[in-house]
Image: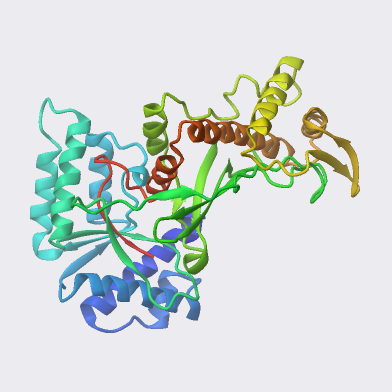
Amino acid sequence: MATDARETAKQENGSRVFFEHVIEKGKEPTDKMMIDIYDGYSPEWRDTYRKQTAALKKYLGSNRGYEYSRDNGIMPYIENIAKKECGVSVKDRWNPMDIVLIKRSMKKVIEGTIRELTNIDGMSKEAKLGLLNAYMRETLKEKILVGVSLKAISKTKKTANAEVANAGGESIPTEVDMVKGSLKCTLTLGRKKPFLFDTGELGFDMETAKGGKIHGQSRNFQYSKDRNLVQTDLTPKGKDAGAKLGKVSSVALDSFLGGMGLERPTSAAKHKHIPPVGKWNDTDKKYWVDLYNKLNSSGMIDFGEVAVYENNKKVAEGIEDVIDYAIIYETKNADRSSAGRFSSKLIAMEWANIWVTISKKGKSKEWCTALYYGAKKEFGDSNGPFLKIY
């Protein structure tokens, strides 16, 4: 789906209308109806909506009589209660549902029950969230209240899949492991584009026990900001290419790392050795040189060519020169992304250190599995149930 919030809203409302017409009325909406909802509607989007609807219809079976909610109705009702009564600060970290179906005949009962469960005096917000999730699991199982999370569907994929998440049961989690030799934190500066690192991330590849391939990256997703938060994002490869798993929840990261006695790398804006642009000193530079040397000696990270290029010619080589030139470039604002990509690359090195540490503890498989389920928003009882269509 699109990353722009307004565009995403239009696309998801397009899904909502398409679902309702096909499932409740037995026919597709007209092109005019769809264009009125989503002005970017096209034959390609019609194909996507058909795949999504077929997967949802297969899951629902003969069930009908739903109200389809996104911007009003049951979905914002549940979201507001989750935030006000249950301590949910970011909705998608709790439940990534984009559309909610509710049986019209049961709407008042469900709304009343949710209100009652989350309005108990003296109960903690965490306990209320547990009750809300438990009730939503029960209603999802009965197909009375169905939260639907929509993921991008590859053009080459003939049919979409529907998979229930966080619904309880005894399903065995998929094991995920790192592809050996795939950790890359390229430190080549200025070769592909003047004044910029060739990439701003720590990249890695993982593979599920069933043979599914996933590419991940930890980076700042807004290079125009000098100092920003680095996030980890996973994207399937191969037959499911293009169907993003999404960004790994910070809750999942903190839960795993805390159990290992580790801490998630801080944001570039708060790192004590990443000063504001123009404020670098020798102590700060030494910190990153030492970290590079430590990581390089591990043999686990591919740093590429640690060198600086200008006008397609190599002008310097080695980690000290790379850092010195990167500082000069961001100080002169040589490119509006110089500072953002530089600080992103430095925090990516901190993430590389996390990978090396976890590997030495023999916990790489557990770490990759935690990333996988953290991106799927399936990593604990604090996560709400939903039906994922992808």
Rendered position, 152 above or below 222: below
Instruction: State which quadrant residue 228 falls in.
Output: top right
Residue at (83, 30) in percent of width and height: 321
**Residue 139 image point, x, y percent:** 14, 56
Instruction: State which quadrant residue 125 falls in.
Output: top left
Q: Nearer the viewer, residue 227 or 106?
A: 227
Q: Nearer the viewer, residue 29 or 256?
A: 256
Instruction: State which quadrant residue 331 falls in.
Output: top right
Quadrant for the C terminus, please. bottom left
82 relative position to 358: left or right: left
**Residue 276 image point, x, y percent:** 68, 24
Q: Nearer the viewer, residue 61 or 295?
A: 295
One can see residue 226 in this view:
no
Q: Nearer the viewer, residue 24 or 294?
A: 294
**Residue 35 image point, x, y percent:** 44, 75
**Residue 360 image point, x, y percent:** 51, 32
One can see residue 40 in this view:
yes
388 relative position to 139: left or right: right
Residue at (80, 49) in percent of width and height: 193
Number of marks: 0
Q: How is the image coloured?
A: rainbow
